[in-house]
Amino acid sequence: MNPLLEEEVPARPVWLTTLADLALLLVGFFVFLQANQMDGKTFAASVRAGFGATEIVDAMPVEMALVAGFAPGSAIPGDSSSAREWARAAARDPRTRVKITGETDGTPQDVDRASGSAAILAADRARAVAALLVASGAASPDRIQIATATGKRRTLITLGFEGDRQ
């Protein structure tokens, strides 16, 4: 007997853990059966409602590329050929959404010269890359979303999926 404890608690039988695992697997199986009976949009809306969300925020990013080489205070991108080729291949599926996030590095030198705003420079960087993608035919303008951030002097291009299976 352990001198620190008055009584030792008897160990649980091993079969009890196995039974609990089996019960959880059975519940999961019935959830999948129920999910297959409703359409995907209704099921996704019910899951969002269960977590307190009311609307779809963004497509979940599954791939990413970047365009770097921006000079401080400049919206002219460096070499973007690899990002254009990546976007051309990745955005072939009509269910994809391309999000372009322009970034600044947060220093006083990396701002828009006319306004002194880092956010405007970040938006200009994202717009410049979006214009390159559209002009080269790599992405359709109606599937592009532009955002801004602070981090490095670059533009991130993420690809997310929206829509149903084809």
Image: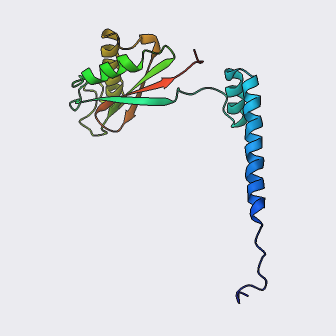
Position of 31 compared to 94: left or right?
Answer: right
Q: Residue furthest bottom?
A: 3
Can residue 117 be spotted in the picture?
Answer: no
Instruction: Tell which of 60 and 49 is nearer to you.
Output: 60
Q: Residue 138: x, y in percent?
A: 35, 14
In the picture, residue 120 is in which quadrant? top left
In the picture, residue 100 is in which quadrant? top left
Q: Residue sitting at 22 percent across and 24 percent down?
A: 79
Position of 44 compared to 152: left or right?
Answer: right
Q: Residue sitting at 32 percent across and 29 percent down?
A: 66
Q: Residue 10: x, y in percent?
A: 78, 75
Q: Residue 84: x, y in percent?
A: 31, 19
Instruction: Tell which of 96 and 21 is nearer to you.
Output: 21
Q: Residue 81: x, y in percent?
A: 25, 21
In the picture, residue 128 is in which quadrant? top left
Count of marks overlaid on the render: 0
User: Quadrant location of the N terminus?
Assistant: bottom right
User: Quadrant location of the C terminus?
Assistant: top right
Does 21 sit above or below residue 80? Answer: below
Which coloring applies here?
rainbow
Position of 39 compared to 146: left or right?
Answer: right
Q: Residue furthest front?
A: 15
Can residue 104 be spotted in the picture?
Answer: yes
Q: Residue sitting at 74 percent across and 84 percent down?
A: 5
